[in-house]
Image (cartoon, helix red, strand yellow):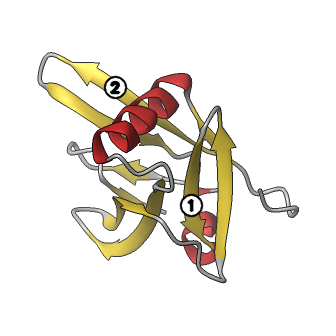
Amino acid sequence: MPDDGRILNLTESAARRIAELKRAERNDALMLRIAVSGGGCSGFQYGFSFDDKINGDDLTFRRDDVTVVVDDVSLDLLAGAEIDYVEELIGASFQVKNPNATSSCGCGTSFAI
């Protein structure tokens, strides 16, 4: 966790789902990487992937037995956000509740600041 006050919260549901995915991959070293890139409907988009390496500009956040990795630039756009895993009738997905976003699109993966 960074010591500059930037935080990222992971819900119990998200941590549980990440742990399930790690077990399915049979790789305890996997971490969920969250990145923000330009693009999408609203200007920026979230990207989710698994990684087993921490780069020099990465910051890590832990809950239970899982780790989330975010690069320093993405964390500027995600500071204070909550990562959740939601199961609904239309499907299940990781969702970001980002207090820095001024608007987002209907797909939930794109936002503007």
Q: Residues within 10 Å of mark 2 (few under 14, many from 20)?
A: few
Residue at 46%, 60% in the rendered image: 33
Check disc 1 and give the amino acid type: Val
Picture layout, residue 26 above or below residue 23: below
Q: Disc number at residue 86? A: 2
Picture layout, residue 103 above or below residue 34: above
Residue at 67%, 44% in the rendered image: 62
Measure how far apart labels 1 and 2 are at the Cα level: 20 Å
Residue at 26%, 49% in the rendered image: 105
Disc 1: which residue: 69
- Using the image as rendered, state which of residue 5 and residue 44 is in the foreground: 5
Left-right relation of 39 to 9:
left
**Residue 77 visible in this rendered orientation of the protein:** no
Check disc 2 and give the amino acid type: Val
- Using the image as rendered, state which of residue 23 and residue 95 is in the foreground: 23
The image shows residue 63 at horizontal and vertical percentages of 65, 36
Picture layout, residue 47 above or below residue 96: below
Q: Disc number at residue 81? A: none
Quarter of the image where one finds residue 99? top right
